[in-house]
Amino acid sequence: AQTVTQSQPEMSVQEAETVTLSCTYDTSESDYYLFWYKQPPSRQMILVIRQEAYKQQNATENRFSVNFQKAAKSFSLKISDSQLGDAAMYFCAYRSARSGTASKLTFGTGTRLQVTL
Amino acid sequence: DVKVTQSSRYLVKRTGEKVFLECVQDMDHENMFWYRQDPGLGLRLIYFSYDVKMKEKGDIPEGYSVSREKKERFSLILESASTNQTSMYLCASSLGGTQYFGPGTRLTVL
């Protein structure tokens, strides 16, 4: 079974600075997808960024980018120019490309990001 | 925009009650999911459905059942609520790989 590990329960960053959230995963498969989701306090979970394992290029979405190291099974999220609105719980998630009829996700335990002035 | 709604944001029930949590999506998605979210444990999959009347157990199905009579609606049922089912429940739907989440229902069982 696949597992996703987020070893940082909490992180803090100053406004306008850069922060990197770590995620590692364990799988025997070669084709899969990785995601970062953001859950602001008392608000809905939303997708931040998605990476296909077969793509070597790291995904980027505005101030959010990933460092995908397939051999190391590492998928970190970098947030540049941090803003107060980035404060949230961040979840890393894995999905096999062979999920069959439904796209099941396996989630990490989350990293709570605090943004300070 | 994809919209996933859940019937209640907060719910308080008593031990032994039958509890229904409703989820509705408006994007004609095939797949729907129920998760529970607990501090330090992340999101754990309870059940999912890939078509009307089709369902599969997730990682923690014990104590839960589901119903999907229409494509847009996926219900989670707690047949006899227990205090260890106090949690945040999240519904999601997907078409392809990306899942879209509802706002969550915080259920407290007394």
Image (cartoon, rainbow, N blue to C red):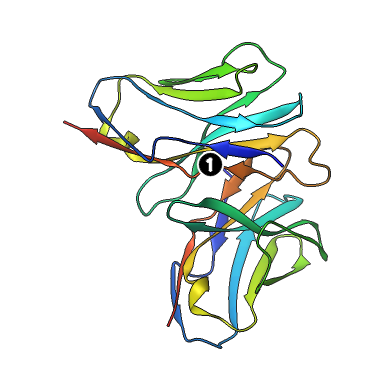
- Between A109 and B5, which is closer to the camera in this rendering? A109
* A97 lies left or right of B21: right
* A89 lies left or right of B89: left
- Between B30 and A41, which is closer to the camera in this rendering? A41
Classify residue B52 by image quadrant: bottom right
Is A76 drawn above or below residue B10 in the view shown?
above
Q: Quadrant of the N terminus of chain B?
A: top right
Q: Position of residue B79 (x, y in %)?
A: 65, 82
Amino acid on which disc 1 is placed: Gly
Within 10 Å of the Cα at label 1, are there few (<14), some (14-19), or many (20+) other Cα atoms?
A: many
Is A69 drawn above or below residue A38 in the view shown?
above
- Residue at image coords 30%, 20%: A81
Q: Residue furthest left?
A: A117
- Between A66 and B42, which is closer to the camera in this rendering? B42
Q: Position of residue B20 (x, y in %)?
A: 60, 77
> How many badges with numbers are in the image?
1
* B85 lies left or right of B92: left
- Residue at image coords 83%, 42%: A100
Mark 1 residue element:
loop
Which residue position holds label 1? A108
Is B1 drawn above or below residue B16 in the view shown?
above
* A12 lies left or right of B39: left
Q: Position of residue B42 (x, y in %)?
A: 50, 49
- Between B85 and B17, which is closer to the camera in this rendering? B85
**Which chain does tag 1 point to?**
A
Classify residue A111 by image quadrant: top left
Q: Position of residue B28 (x, y in %)?
A: 73, 51
Q: Quadrant of the C terminus of chain B?
A: bottom left
- Residue at image coords 70%, 32%: A27
